[in-house]
Amino acid sequence: KAGVTQTPRYLIKTRGQQVTLSCSPISGHRSVSWYQQTPGQGLQFLFEYFSETQRNKGNFPGRFSGRQFSNSRSEMNVSTLELGDSALYLCASSSIAGVGTGELFFGEGSRLTVL
Amino acid sequence: QKEVEQDPGPLSVPEGAIVSLNCTYSNSAFQYFMWYRQYSRKGPELLMYTYSSGNKEDGRFTAQVDKSSKYISLFIRDSQPSDSATYLCAMSLRNSWGKLQFGAGTQVVVTP
């Protein structure tokens, strides 16, 4: 069974640009969560989608947005990039049984560098 | 003050030793407790998941939760060099869906 797939794995952008990251969950998983990981702040929750609806949102500015498609694939977008947005962005999926329990399966992440 | 406190280490132990990791938390409403392992340049991998206070054992891993003290632990017996990784505790509220509160992670190095 394939795991969570994130693309691209690495990308470099400049300040002011925008970026879109993609996540394909484990087959059958309908919940997708996004996290930002930095050395200073650790893993921080961005948002979660279930059946194309945003169920939960973390404390990030409106420049961070996401969406989920009918096939459960998800994208997140960061507009007007800042240097502080450099981070590893992790996507995690969960089955219905695991929804609400923290049993998340993470992808390998998309490493974003903002210059 | 962070909701979840975890010593970042690094924690260095010889092969075969017991690794002891712990986290403290301030929010008594947390109901689900997890330990994730993260290798360098990889995503976190779920190791242990517990719901209530008490112990849970899985092979060489034992997770303990003490809700009265707001304290969780992970023990790794007979540690191996392949256990060298960052261990993250995480916890969540009931019905919080995929919103987990993570500790900072403890870097563990098991030396042969």
Image (cartoon, grey):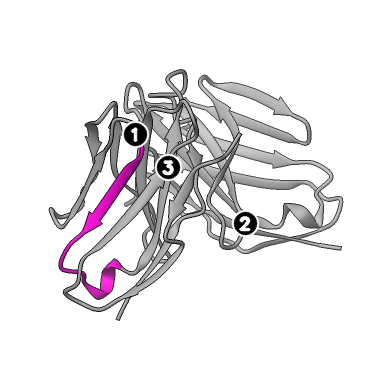
Q: Which quarter of the figure has residue A42? A: bottom left
Closest to the camera, between mark 2 and mark 1, is 2
Residue A8 position, x and y percent, is 42, 61
SS for tag 1? loop
Label at residue A24: 3
Identify the amino acid type marked 3.
Ser
Q: How many marks?
A: 3
Where the C terminus of chain A falls, by quadrant?
A: bottom left
Give the residue number, with chain letter if any, for mark 1: B27
Q: Chain of mark 3?
A: A
Q: Look at the numbered discs 2 and 1 and tell me whether their residues touch, using CB distance below 8 Å.
A: no
Please give the name of the residue rendered at 84% of the width and 45% of the height, measured from the top-left corner. B78
Q: Which quarter of the figure has residue B100? A: top left
Q: Look at the numbered discs 1 and 3 and tell me whether their residues touch, using CB distance below 8 Å.
A: no
Residue B32 position, x and y percent, is 46, 26
Identify the amino acid type marked 2.
Tyr
Give the residue number, with chain letter if any, for mark 2: B39
Where the N terminus of chain A falls, by quadrant?
A: top right
Residue farthest along the front direction in this orientation: A71
